Image (cartoon, rainbow, N blue to C red):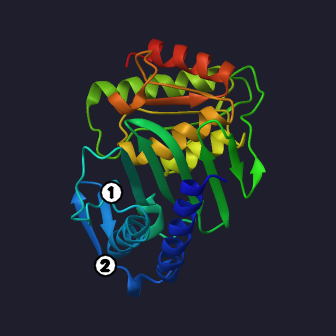
């Protein structure tokens, strides 16, 4: 494991311990909403602060981009930028649904170099570094080998903040088309963990139209390092620019991209 990935994993483990003290303990959770259908808890903020404190102590010249914006460290021109989602799947966490994660990505001059995703409920640690592959609990991950949509597991959802009627209609078209092709669409509520599952071969494809950088950064690199493909809804190769993510093993990725285009997005 490369040193920077190792440091990120260490920080994620410390944050995970803090988060799990509050899981299934509503008396310890203070809930608010950043915007409609976008909850945040005191534990999100605590975990982000922990991660930034751990990493900035080791890398004082690095920049940090956190979902909860708890840090006063703002170095947009720094060579290295850490992209942090302290709890990806906050709604699940608040509702005691055991599907959420800590996600930490690292970019060098705008290019993803490292990614760590920790599932504290299942004690699963997904780690990747550019050119070094992707590992789950120190075992190499590879995307699935399924070559058709029939029988495939595809995770897709429409963000709770996305109420555009045309997009809702397009999403319904996509779901119908996938089911018609024999796929098994799923929705889980944690995009970062979904991408890790694509990398691990547990699911064959993933698509979501409205994501933030911290939702996807670690997972995108994980998928490509595990042999998968990533893109956006318009056929582009850099979903970080658009926020729309398509990912999967190479064959399912191409088929899923075709379905998305035909659905009217």
The residue lying at 55 percent from left, 38 percent from top is: 221
Mark 2 nearby-residue class (10 Å; few <14, some 14–19, many ≥20) = few
The residue lying at 26 percent from left, 32 percent from top is: 164
Could you tell me if residue 86 is visible in this image? Answer: yes
- Helix, strand or loop at label 2? It is loop
Mark 1 nearby-residue class (10 Å; few <14, some 14–19, many ≥20) = some
Left/right placement of residue 22 relative to residue 42 reads right
Q: Position of residue 141 (x, y in %)?
A: 74, 43
Q: Position of residue 198 (x, y in %)?
A: 64, 39
Task: Provide the residue designation for mark 2.
Answer: 30
Q: Which mark is residue 61?
A: 1
Could you tell me if residue 100 is visible in this image? Answer: no
Left/right placement of residue 78 relative to residue 180 reads left
Q: Is residue 51 above or below residue 229?
A: below
Q: Is residue 199 above or below residue 44?
A: above
| Disc 1/disc 2 C-alpha distance (Å) | 32 Å
Q: Is residue 31 above or below residue 210?
A: below
- The part of the image, by quadrant, that contains residue 154 is top right
């Amino acid at each position: 494991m490369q040193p920077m990935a190792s440091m990120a994993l260490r920080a994620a483990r410390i944050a995970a311990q803090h988060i799990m003290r509050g899981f299934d303990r509503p008396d310890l959770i203070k809930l608010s909403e950043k915007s409609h259908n976008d909850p945040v808890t005191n534990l999100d903020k605590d975990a982000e602060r922990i991660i930034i404190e751990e990493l900035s102590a080791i890398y004082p010249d690095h920049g940090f981009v956190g979902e909860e914006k708890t840090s006063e460290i703002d170095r947009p021109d720094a060579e290295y930028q850490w992209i942090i989602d302290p709890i990806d799947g906050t709604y699940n966490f608040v509702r005691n649904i055991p599907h959420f994660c800590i996600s930490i990505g690292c970019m060098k001059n705008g290019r993803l170099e490292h990614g760590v995703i920790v599932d504290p409920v299942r004690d699963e640690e997904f780690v990747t570094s550019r050119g070094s592959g992707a590992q789950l609990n120190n075992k190499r991950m590879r995307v699935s080998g399924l070559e058709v949509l029939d029988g495939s597991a595809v995770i897709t959802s429409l963000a709770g903040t996305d109420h555009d009627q045309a997009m809702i209609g397009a999403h319904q078209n996509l779901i119908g088309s996938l089911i018609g092709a024999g796929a098994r669409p799923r929705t889980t509520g944690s995009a970062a963990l979904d991408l890790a599952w694509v990398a691990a071969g547990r699911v064959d494809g993933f698509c979501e139209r409205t994501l933030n950088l911290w939702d996807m950064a670690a997972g995108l690199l994980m998928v490509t390092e595990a042999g998968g493909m990533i893109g956006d809804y318009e056929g582009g190769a850099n979903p970080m620019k658009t926020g729309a993510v398509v990912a999967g093993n190479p064959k399912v990725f191409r088929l899923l991209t075709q379905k998305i285009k035909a659905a009217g997005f």
